[in-house]
Amino acid sequence: MKTLITASALVLTAFAASASVTAEIGTYAPGVDVSTLTDAEVNTILSVIHSGDSEGEKRALVQALVK
């Protein structure tokens, strides 16, 4: 029973994180299907989003990366 609860909690955490990533990327590149991106691409995009660049630079870089 404990294993089932732990597994359920992990699945819910992964789902919430996935929704958060989709929302973050969607802020800079609306309409992008995040599920088509590789893990490396998502990590690169998140690095850009959390960088110290201006919002315009972030938007341009993210949009260039998802094309």
Image (cartoon, rainbow, N blue to C red):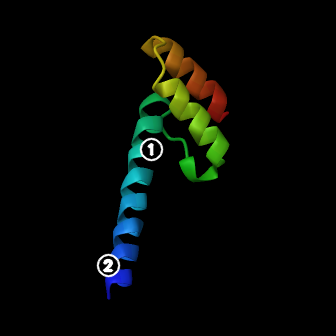
Q: CA distance from mark 2 to mark 1?
A: 24 Å
User: What residue type is disc 1 on?
Assistant: Val
Could you tell me which secondary element the residue under label 2 belongs to? helix
Figure quadrant of the N terminus: bottom left
Q: Position of residue 55 (x, y in %)?
A: 43, 15
User: What residue type is disc 2 on?
Assistant: Ile
Per the image, the residue denoted by label 1 is 21
Lower sequence index among marks 2 and 1: 2
CB atoms of marks 2 and 1 within 8 Å: no
Foreground: 60 or 51?
Answer: 51
In the image, residue 29 sits, relative to residue 38, either above or below, namely: above
Q: Residue at x 66, y 42 (%)?
A: 40
Per the image, the residue denoted by label 2 is 5
Q: Dot 1, how many residues are within 10 Å of its Cα: few (below 14), some (14-19), or many (20+)? A: some
Q: Dot 2, how many residues are within 10 Å of its Cα: few (below 14), some (14-19), or many (20+)? A: few
Q: Position of residue 20 (x, y in %)?
A: 38, 46
Foreground: 47 or 20?
Answer: 47
Left or right? Give the position of 13 relative to 33.
left
Foreground: 30 or 21?
Answer: 21
Left or right? Give the position of 42 relative to 22.
right
- Viewer-nearest of discs 2 and 1: 2
Q: Quadrant of residue 43?
A: top right
Q: Position of residue 9 (x, y in %)?
A: 34, 69
